[in-house]
Image (cartoon, rainbow, N blue to C red):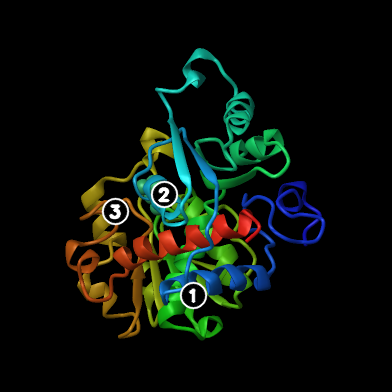
Amino acid sequence: MSGDPDTAFQYRSDGRLLHLLTLRDMPAAMITGILDRAQALAEGGRPHAGRGILGNLFFEPSTRTRCSFEIAAAHLGWHVVTVAAGTSSQVKGETLADTVQTLATMGVTAFAVRHEESGAALEAARAAPEGVAVINAGGGSADHPSQGLLDALTVRREKPDIASLSVAICGDVRHSRVARSDVQVFSALGVTDIRLVGPSELLPEEAPAGCTPVGDMNAGIRDADVIVMLRIQTERMQKASIPEPSEYHRHWGLTRERLALARPDCLVLHPGPMNRGVEIADEVADGPRSRVLQQVRNGILTRMALLEALAGA
Ligand code: CP
């Protein structure tokens, strides 16, 4: 386990998960345990009955993650309360910590926190009373751990020998929390060929250990087993550095012709929301190699497994 306070903070003294803030340095056995449980649920396993209340704190837009946590909680028999930016007392100056403590006092047992600030989930976890879990549901450009886990589940269900795969993560890697969580989860599961593919201004200034930056789309996806496409995250960029969409598509978009360079059974993932005609062509998004909707289904299973684990099941 890392000595880093952010990562150490998410574990109990016996090593079990207390919060899910990041996949950074998460032991492979813990990742595998969550994926195994999600897989068991996919195969008809009965959810553990619970009495939880999920507090969905979404201070940044979301369709998939917010609804996925709501539906996962409903499948477990939990209640859900949702607090959204613009309609919460945050607009009157309430701090995130006060929001967490207020809702925990009402009986919320776990929070899913989406925020533009990378450190918001940690702040919520520090404020949460003992026994109340916090899940980072996407923070800034740093972490989106439940997305990383559901992406790994989506790949593992079709390609169980995950360590042998070549994974290309393409597009706006620099501003992507999904890219970071995907690199962490695939690295932990033993993948050694992880390529970060995109124009230099959209790649990290320093590639994470074990990743290969590739500045050419065709070279980056050649013989890949898995391609993860990312949208350009304009909300985290300077206006001047946003590429023109049709030009971007020409150089970096995943088209049917380009996909033919990857392995014939290559899986195409995209965390969504997709910008069709920019990073991905319709024919690929809706084509036979696309696993976008499987990711959505697996998201519910993964979040059920996570809520169970955090509730101590
Ligand atoms: N994948 C993802 O985080 O999508 P949303 O922003 O719609 O939640």
Q: Where, by quadrant of the figure, is residue 207 drawn?
A: bottom right
Mark 2: C-beta under 8 Å from nearest atom of ligand 1: yes
Mark 1, Cα crowd under 10 Å, few <14 / some 14-19 / many 20+, is some
Nearer to us: label 2 or label 1 = 1
Q: Position of residue 303 (x, y in %)?
A: 49, 57
Q: Earlier in the sequence, mark 1 or mark 3?
A: 1
Q: Secondary structure at mark 3?
A: loop
Mark 1: C-beta under 8 Å from nearest atom of ligand 1: no
Left or right: where does residue 246 sit relative to residue 272? left
Q: Earlier in the sequence, mark 2 or mark 1?
A: 1
Determine the residue positioned at 49% across, 64% down. 47
Q: Is residue 211 above or below residue 60?
A: below
Q: Which residue is mark 2?
A: 65
Q: Which residue is mark 3?
A: 274
Amino acid type, mark 3: Met
Amino acid type, mark 1: Ala
Estimate the spatial distance between the alpha carbons at disc 2 and disc 1, rounded to whole Å. 21 Å
Mark 1–mark 3 CB contact (< 8 Å)? no
Q: Secondary structure at mark 1?
A: helix
Determine the residue positioned at 49% across, 75% down. 40
Of all residues, the one furthest to the left in this rendering is: 283
Q: Which residue is mark 1?
A: 40
Left or right: where does residue 286 sit relative to residue 77? left
